[in-house]
Image (cartoon, grey):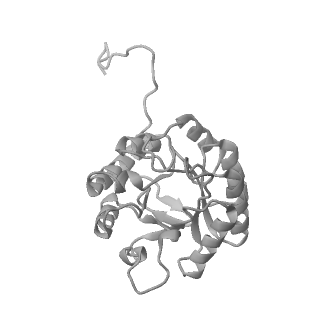
Amino acid sequence: MKDKPFNLFGKEYKSRLIVGTGKYKTPDIMVNALEASGTEIVTVALRRVNLEGDSKTLLDYIDTERYTLLPNTAGCYTADEAIRVARLSREMGIGDLVKIEVLGDQKTLLPDVEELLKATRVLVKENFIVMAYTNDDVITAKKLEDLGVAAVMPLGAPIGSGLGILNYHNIRLILEAVKAPVIVDAGVGTASDITRAMELGIDGVLLNTGIACASDPVMMACAMKKACEAGRFAYLAGRIPKKAYASASTPIKDF
């Protein structure tokens, strides 16, 4: 089946999966899982990157010729923190692309919308390409689009919870409300979560824990890849309408 490319910040990608690099037991497992997932964009938490010393860092295991690096501000709880981390990423030479994540508290890891909007406003003015992790709220999504984000990233469920997509209705409303790419981020636990999300017509899915903490991360990464493709094809094909009553699969009359 033919599909239009996944166009993000002026670049085309074949894969609609964005995969994180945290929580893997070893760097080799991470490398193999990234390859099995088919991803072309990988996220890196800058607060976990050792910028000093001669020891290897996470970035040493990622082939930047093969993958687009998406640095993120994971672990930031204020706009000022997120802005500082994004600027550091630029100074490191990683580039202008950044996923902004400003959390509200350590228990739920839910976004602090007020601080998120504040950070986004500053970074967009500084010509960063901002992808914004937010809650599944239509109004916030529209405000982020008005600020000029490259993508709106509503959560499917709390980070690392594995609960899947908790509110499909809100994701549909966001898709109707914004023209920017919509990427579901956080909460994916298994392949069926990705399939159901993609069937809504979203542009992509970002996940980490669902792969990294699986019993077999490489096999799960392969499953996630196939699930993403299946969900996208199902969306493009157009599902049959739901009915209250049965409809015979064999017609009374011949064709």
Q: Is residue 137 above or below residue 116?
A: above
**Between 28 and 2, the one nearer to me in the picture:** 28
Q: Quadrant of residue 162?
A: top left
- Left or right? Give the position of 156 relative to 250: right
Q: Residue at x 44, y 41 (%)?
A: 164
**Between 252 and 161, the one nearer to me in the picture:** 161
Tell me if I can see residue 2 in this picture: no
* Quadrant holding the C terminus: top left
Residue 145 position within the rendered picture, expressed as x and y whole percent measured from the top left:
68, 54
Q: Quadrant of residue 86?
A: bottom right
Tell me if I can see residue 217 in this picture: yes
Residue 14 position within the rendered picture, expressed as x and y whole percent measured from the top left:
41, 60
Q: Residue at x 45, y 63 (%)?
A: 13
Q: Residue at x 60, y 62 (%)?
A: 76
Furthest residue toward bottom? 54
**Between 90 and 169, the one nearer to me in the picture:** 90
| Total labels drawn | 0
Furthest residue toward front? 107
- Left or right? Give the position of 22 relative to 27: right
- Left or right? Give the position of 123 relative to 96: right
Q: Is residue 125 above or below residue 140?
A: below
Q: Is residue 3 above or below residue 157?
A: below
- Left or right? Give the position of 196 relative to 77: left
Residue 24 position within the rendered picture, expressed as x and y whole percent measured from the top left:
35, 62
Residue 93 position within the rendered picture, expressed as x and y whole percent measured from the top left:
54, 81
